[in-house]
Amino acid sequence: MRLLDAAHSAPARYALVFAGLSAVVMGALLALIYGWATSLLERHLEEVVEQQLSVLRADLVQDGRDSVVGLVRQHAKRQDASPMHLLVQDGKGRVLAGDLPPVTPSEGWQEIKLPPDSGDLNGARRMFRGLGTRLDDNTFILVMHDTADLRQTRALLIWSFAIALGITTALALFGGLAIGGALLRRVDDINRTARAIMDGDLSRRIPAVGWHDELGRLAESLNQMFARIEALMENLRHITSSISHDLRSPLGRHRQRLEATRLKPRSPAEYETAIDAAVEDTCVILEIFDAILRIAQIEAGTPRERFSQVDLSGVAENIMDAFVAVAEDEGKPFLARIDPNITARGDRELLTQMLVNLVENALRHTPNGTRLQMCIEMRAGRPQITLSDNGPGIPAKERDRVFRRFYRLDASRTTPGSGLGLSFVAAVAKLHDATISLEDNSPGLRVVVAFPQAMCS
């Protein structure tokens, strides 16, 4: 991705916002720490000044003013070794002792500025903070403390906090950009895959990066959707090809009969026969289209609105009543083992038609003498329908293919049908979240439809 595109991307904007918020929060925190630290230092300075002033007052009470003046003079001799500076003035403002220039007596806390020392290369003015007080004999005492250390500490805190704030902001910005860039690359993978699929490459998939996060789950869901789209498109191509192939025969027959009828005059009875044959061919074509439409509607999931609790035992008994006589006429005993009160949530009409298709498929593709059995029971806590026979069965390699639309085994191409019966069964089973499997009945075939436990009553 180009730098200009990255700068205008959503991750870049989010990184800037995140860096700004981090700077504000960090600045507020550092300001709070700075205020607390400087306040603590100032309070310590004031406590030192008050303590020194208390010492002088105690000495005055005990030994008099001369003793205080002596102490101040001794302190003045070692002023370079102490940040404390003292001044004693009499009532007329004359300096009695100290290392400070005379000042206008003023009680309370105050600050003074003095010219820099001659040896100070920086030429900075000296600043003092102290406390002045008058004694009972009108003597004025001023105790001042050099604030150089306090000012240096403040400057050090400001510079340290400025550096910390800059580093924090930079880390937030570049960290956000790095994380956003990584996310953006994954989004670009999704976009490139989507564009490739839109351009017709249905086999493309989003690369898996091994991260089980939201984007990883999104990529997995999209890949499943793309796979589903590819399967649907492949199914559509197969359906289109199958429709053109399977409708060619009835349409060709339909046309040949009509053309043959037109070749020479015929009797009314012959015209009626030709018309009846044309109507029959038309009905076959309409049945094929109706089956395709019903399967498409089922796969779209629209019938779920009609779901209710369905009595599978009752449905199976009704089907047995309808097909037992038909099966016996064809020399195929039809037995049943139906447990009572087996229910599943679904569409009663579709489930009934699914069972009818399974029974009709078994009757149509098995020889005389074949024994059929239907079983409705609970198996492992799941409602299960089993339809078995001892006929020729279906080869193992063909069992997955028979659920495709219009797919017919070579042995079944001479029997009536469109190849949509089991496709309908598979669509109904999928709609009801049921599993359908074809198993070897040794000999014959066993069809098992198992509903999920969530659909049990």
Image (cartoon, rainbow, N blue to C red):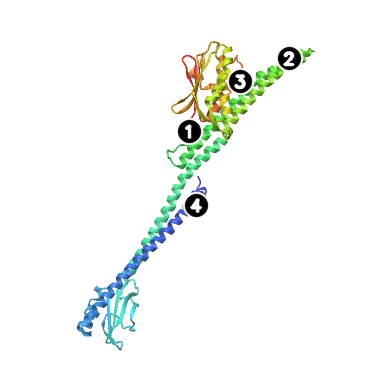
Q: Classify 355 as above or below 84.
A: above
Q: Label 1 near label 2: C-beta < 8 Å?
A: no
Alpha carbon distance from label 2 to label 1 = 54 Å
151, above or below 413, in the image: below
Q: Residue at x 60, y 15 (%)?
A: 415
Q: Is residue 290 left or right of residue 57?
A: right
Give the left or right position of residue 138, taking residue 430 as reference: left
Q: CA distance from mark 3 to mark 2?
A: 24 Å
Label 4 neighbour load within 10 Å: few <14, some 14-19, many 20+: some
- Viewer-nearest of labels 3 and 2? 2
Q: Secondary structure at mark 1?
A: helix
| Residue 124 figure quarter | bottom left
User: Residue 187, how many percent across, how many down?
Assistant: 50, 42
Q: Which of pointers 3 and 1 lies earlier in the amino acid sequence?
A: 3
Instruction: Look at mark 4 in the image and give the residue it sits on.
Output: 13
Q: x and y percent of residue 142 in the render?
A: 29, 80
Label 3, secondary structure: give it: loop
Look at label 1 and name its amino acid. Ala
Could you tell whether 444 is left or right of 238 in the image? Answer: left
Instruction: Please name the amino acid that badge 4 sits on.
Output: Arg
Which is closer to the viewer, label 2 or label 4? 2
Determine the residue positioned at 44% across, 38% down: 209
Residue wearing tag 3:
418
- The amino acid sitting under disc 2 is Thr
